[in-house]
Image (cartoon, grey):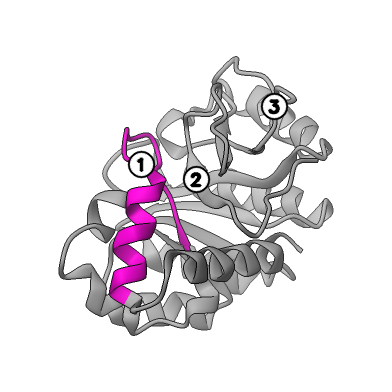
Amino acid sequence: MSLPDPGDYIDIHTHHGTHPEKGIFSVVSLMAHEEAGLLPLPGIAYTFGIHPWHLSASSYEDHISGVRKAAADSRVLAIGEAGFDRLRGPDPELQRKAFEEQALIAAEHHKPVIVHCVRAWDELLRARKRLRPARPWLVHGFRGSRDLAAQLISKDMFLSFWFGFIIRPEAGKLIRSLPRERIFLETDGSGAGIRNIYVKVSADLDISVSGLKRIIYDNFMDFFG
């Protein structure tokens, strides 16, 4: 199992992981419908799950089987991204079933969950209440309000911010209002550079880049246990 160093830039959620870069630790999101494998690359760890955009009744059992297999692999640090999307994907009941089964698989293996959520926060919070997981969840690509962020954090969730949001000037006010021990940064599927995102956020928090690296590293060790 690959782990970061305290001096690394940690990209907590990316879909680009075939070319590791020195000084960057990437958590690569693999999806059950893809054929990509778990490659033993330096500076790379993985998550694995059924993305709601690629969820269907016909492939459900095969994909859940893939999640079960991946969950047993030490290179897979978390299950996901999995979740809810009101704008794209199958009917809400199938999304709920898929998310909750993946969350239960994660719990069986004592792993956290990486969450995709678009305009379905009530469904996510209900799932958290029903399942009462022992491990935290991470909402990736967050770009919501301060009140929503505070609500999610109060339910034992971490937040990773959508790259296109966090580089905006107005994002500084939000990130300054949140507990630093609950934040992560990501590039998702973009071509954005994680180093540039760290520079922007360190300026927003009025700390050095090395200080931000340490915060994110500590959060990583806390979240993944």
Nearer to me, 155 or 199: 199
In this rendering, the label closer to the viewer, 2 or 3: 3
Q: Which residue is mark 3?
A: 41
Look at 68% across and 53% down and name the residue there: 5
Q: Is residue 196 shown in magenta?
A: yes
The disc label shown at residue 13, or none:
2
Nearer to me, 168 or 155: 168
Q: Quadrant of residue 25?
A: top right
Look at 65% across and 60% down and name the residue there: 6
Rendered-image quadrant of the C terminus: bottom right
The residues bearing labels 2 and 1 have C-alpha atoms spaced at a distance of 12 Å
Above or below: residue 174 compared with residue 70: below
Tag 2: residue type?
A: His
Counting from the top left corner in percent of width and height, residue 35 is at 60, 14
Q: Is residue 37 shown in magenta?
A: no
Do the numbered discs 1 and 3 sit on residues whose CB atoms are within 8 Å?
Answer: no
Q: Which residue is mark 1?
A: 193
Give the extent of the magenta segment. 184-204
Counting from the top left corner in percent of width and height, residue 41 is at 69, 27
Q: Is residue 85 visible?
A: no
Element on which disc 2 rests:
strand
The residues bearing labels 2 and 3 have C-alpha atoms spaced at a distance of 16 Å
